[in-house]
Image (spheres, rainbow, N blue to C red):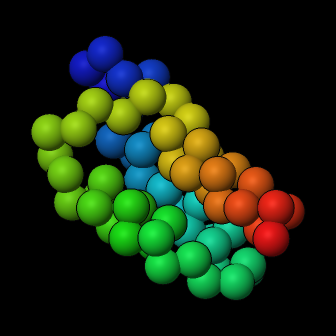
Amino acid sequence: MKGGGYLTEDEVIREALRVYELIEQEDQDSELEAALRHSLRSPLKKYKHGHFAALANRNSRRAIAA
């Protein structure tokens, strides 16, 4: 949307839901979940394409390192 990488609100919601499903499939990560919830409640944050996927990838890297 404005300066982000998403054309519509639907794209933001669709990606957030996709990442949420990934989180549900893996072990719960309270830090990632809190960041996702905070991002979803923050109307002033400019989201760029891949924002939520980047959060999920960060979680995957932690799991590999552990």
What's the residue at 31%, 16% (across, down)? 3
> In the image, what residue occupies the spot 36% across and 34% down?
47
Q: Quadrant of the C terminus?
A: bottom right
Is 34 positioned to the left or the right of 58 in the image?
left
> Where is 43 relative to 19, above or below?
above
Residue 36 in the image, given as x and y percentages of width and height: 41, 62
Name above or below for residue 23 compared with residue 49.
below
Which residue appears at 70% of the width and 83% of the height?
A: 27
- Looking at the image, which residue sits at the far top? 3
What residue is at 46 percent from the left and 70 percent from the top? 31
Q: With respect to residue 15, does 47 lie above or below?
A: above
Residue reaching furthest left? 44
Residue toward you, 62 or 32:
62
Find residue 44 and report its horizontal and vertical position in percent.
14, 39
Q: 21 or 65, which is in the foreground?
A: 65
Q: Position of residue 30 (x, y in %)?
A: 48, 79
Residue 64 seen from this side: yes
What quarter of the picture does the N terminus occupy?
Answer: top left
Left/right placement of residue 36 relative to residue 53 reads left
Q: Position of residue 19 (x, y in %)?
A: 59, 60
